[in-house]
Image: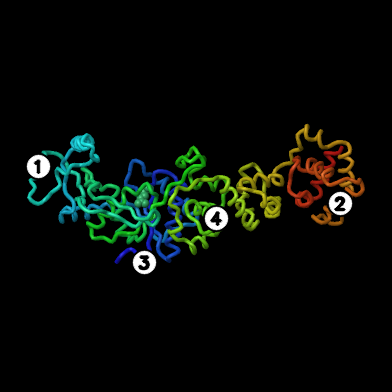
């Protein structure tokens, strides 16, 4: 069966050598969306054969990141280190059927072969000393030297595939080296493990970063030697930083969980990451469900995407604005506490209502909410002197008297008291609005002042007004 006629199975295959970074998260997202779109299966495979650099913490960071984004795998995580027996079994099988062979050339000898090729103006490569051919006499086996196993790569013809992103890609087989598939200590090498796993896990579509394009012909030729079906491949261009360089730590946070810390919503992150290299018409805002419904590899971009923090903030602001205030309140409560605020005495969802239209991140929202969740800090003296003039204090006293007499304390009644005060003094709103803000909140700028006063409560407002006008 070809990859096209088998049930769709995709995989995300990170190497657990660090956190889940933005590029990895985006590749995972495309594989996940493709599988979901086709009612297929999304597999998570942990490529942990680099034992020096792989850590359990990194595995956990990857799982946490995927969980946060809501991209749960249907199968896995599978760990390559637990599949060593299977790789060895197939290496033996290839040795037995002649698609692989022992090579006793030492690393120094191979270096020398490469150097010779270079001097002849050829591609540096292994010269095939130990490659068995009919009628060829192999050298004597050097004593005490453990061999590597090399794949006997076809030397003629072309290996090509219809890349889901880049179109036809071809390599002359004459350019492909006889790849080492097992090291001298018997451990299988990277490309071989990937091939065996993609086969055993019945992967039909491999969507990955285009830094793997050069591995693909090697993987295809090995799959063919194993008589295994060849999946469809799609290589996604990398993400560039705002300055056009490859995205890296220099550009700010690259770990996906850092975005959680900074107050980005996972829905916003999914939406933004999907737009980095994929599009559906002019749509900028869409849900994970819409992404799944629309996802098509033909709309993956051939050129590199550029990270744009301003756009991410715009997308995040949109999601904050459209998320239920009670849900946001729950999310920001621990953030407020971490900032030293106190959330138990306040109706936090109402506070969120006041600020959520303007917040770019949940961290902004938490900081805004401190207005209601932390002890009152009067405005700096210079600001008080500037704003709380004797005229302003007169206005505040009038307002205070009216506020004391209100039969109900709510936005409408407060707004009326403000209007009445303005009418009595024949002045316009800023004349009262700014002093009122400075007196009651210590800040010049707040959301609608009637709503702020309603939430603070009458006794608090009156006490602060007394303090400011005495
Ligand atoms: N483990 C590889 C990486 O993290 C990915 C391999 C693949 O997708 O084929 O770059």
- Name the residue at 79% across, 55% down: 411
> In the rendering, which numbered label is found on residue 7?
3
Helix, strand, or loop for circle 2? helix
Residue 425, horizontal then vertical, whole percent: 91, 45
> In the rendering, which numbered label is found on residue 440?
none
Marked residue nearer the N-terminal end (1 or 4): 1
Number of numbered callouts drawn: 4
Marked residue nearer the N-terminal end (1 or 3): 3
Marked residue nearer the N-terminal end (1 or 2): 1
Q: Do residues under tags 1 and 2 come within 8 Å of each other at their CB atoms?
A: no
Residue 295, horizontal then vertical, whole percent: 47, 61
Would residue 209 appear left or right of 138 to someone viewing this image? right
State the quadrant of the N terminus: bottom left
* Residues at marks 1 and 3, CA–CA distance in whole angstroms: 48 Å
Closer to the camera: disc 1 or disc 4?
A: 1
Nearer-the-camera pick, 320 or 441: 320
State the quadrant of the C terminus: top right
Crowd class of label 2 (few under 14; some 14 to 19; many from 20; radius 10 Å)? some
Q: Do residues under tags 2 and 3 come within 8 Å of each other at their CB atoms?
A: no
* Residues at marks 4 and 3, CA–CA distance in whole angstroms: 28 Å
Furthest-front residue in view?
121
* Residues at marks 1 and 2, CA–CA distance in whole angstroms: 101 Å
* Residues at marks 1 and 4, CA–CA distance in whole angstroms: 62 Å
266 vs 341: above or below: below
User: Which residue position holds label 2?
Assistant: 419
* Residues at marks 4 and 2, CA–CA distance in whole angstroms: 42 Å
Q: Do residues under tags 1 and 3 come within 8 Å of each other at their CB atoms?
A: no
- Name the residue at 52% across, 62% down: 290
Would residue 3 appear left or right of 349 to someone viewing this image? left
Residue 133, horizontal then vertical, whole percent: 12, 50
Residue 6, horizontal then vertical, whole percent: 34, 66
User: Which residue position holds label 1?
Assistant: 139
């Amino acid at each position: 069966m070809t990859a096209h006629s088998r049930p769709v199975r995709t995989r995300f295959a990170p190497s657990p050598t660090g956190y889940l970074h933005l590029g990895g998260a985006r590749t995972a997202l495309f594989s996940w969306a493709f599988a979901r779109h086709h009612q297929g299966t999304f597999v998570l495979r942990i490529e942990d054969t680099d034992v020096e650099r792989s850590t359990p913490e990194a595995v956990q960071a990857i799982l946490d990141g995927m969980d946060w984004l809501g991209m749960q795998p249907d199968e896995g995580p599978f760990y390559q280190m637990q599949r060593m027996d299977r790789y060895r079994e197939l290496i033996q099988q290839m040795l037995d059927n002649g698609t692989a062979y022992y090579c006793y050339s030492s690393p120094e000898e191979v270096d020398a072969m490469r150097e010779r090729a270079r001097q002849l103006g050829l591609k540096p490569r292994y010269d095939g000393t130990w490659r068995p051919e009919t009628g060829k006499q192999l050298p004597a086996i050097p004593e005490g030297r453990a061999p590597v196993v090399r794949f006997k790569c076809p030397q003629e013809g072309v290996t090509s595939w219809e890349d889901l992103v880049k179109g036809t890609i071809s390599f002359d087989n004459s350019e492909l080296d006889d790849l080492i598939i097992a090291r001298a200590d018997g451990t299988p090498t990277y490309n071989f493990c990937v091939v065996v796993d993609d086969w055993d896990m019945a992967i039909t579509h491999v969507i990955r970063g285009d830094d793997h394009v050069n591995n693909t012909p090697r993987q295809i030729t090995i799959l063919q030697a194993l008589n295994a079906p060849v999946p469809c491949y799609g290589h996604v261009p990398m993400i560039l930083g705002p300055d056009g360089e490859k995205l890296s730590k220099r550009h700010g946070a690259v770990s996906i969980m850092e975005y959680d810390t900074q107050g980005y919503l996972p829905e916003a992150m999914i939406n933004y990451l999907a737009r980095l290299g994929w599009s559906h018409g002019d749509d900028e805002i869409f849900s994970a469900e819409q992404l799944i419904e629309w996802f098509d590899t033909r709309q993956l971009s051939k050129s590199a995407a550029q990270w744009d923090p301003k756009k991410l903030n715009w997308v995040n602001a949109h999601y904050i604005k459209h998320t239920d205030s009670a849900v946001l309140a729950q999310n920001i409560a621990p953030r407020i506490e971490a900032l030293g605020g106190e959330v138990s005495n306040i109706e936090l969802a109402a506070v969120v209502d006041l600020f959520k239209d303007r917040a770019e991140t949940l961290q902004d929202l938490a900081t805004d909410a401190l207005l209601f969740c932390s002890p009152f800090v009067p405005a700096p003296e210079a600001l008080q002197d500037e704003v709380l003039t004797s005229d302003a204090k007169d206005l505040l006293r009038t307002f205070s008297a009216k506020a004391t007499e209100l039969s109900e304390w709510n936005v409408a009644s407060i707004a009326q008291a403000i209007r009445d005060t303005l009418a009595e003094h024949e002045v316009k709103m800023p004349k009262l609005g700014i002093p009122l803000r400075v007196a009651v909140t210590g800040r010049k700028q707040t959301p609608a002042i009637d709503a702020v006063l309603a939430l603070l409560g009458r006794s608090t407002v009156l006490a602060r007004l007394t303090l400011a006008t005495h």
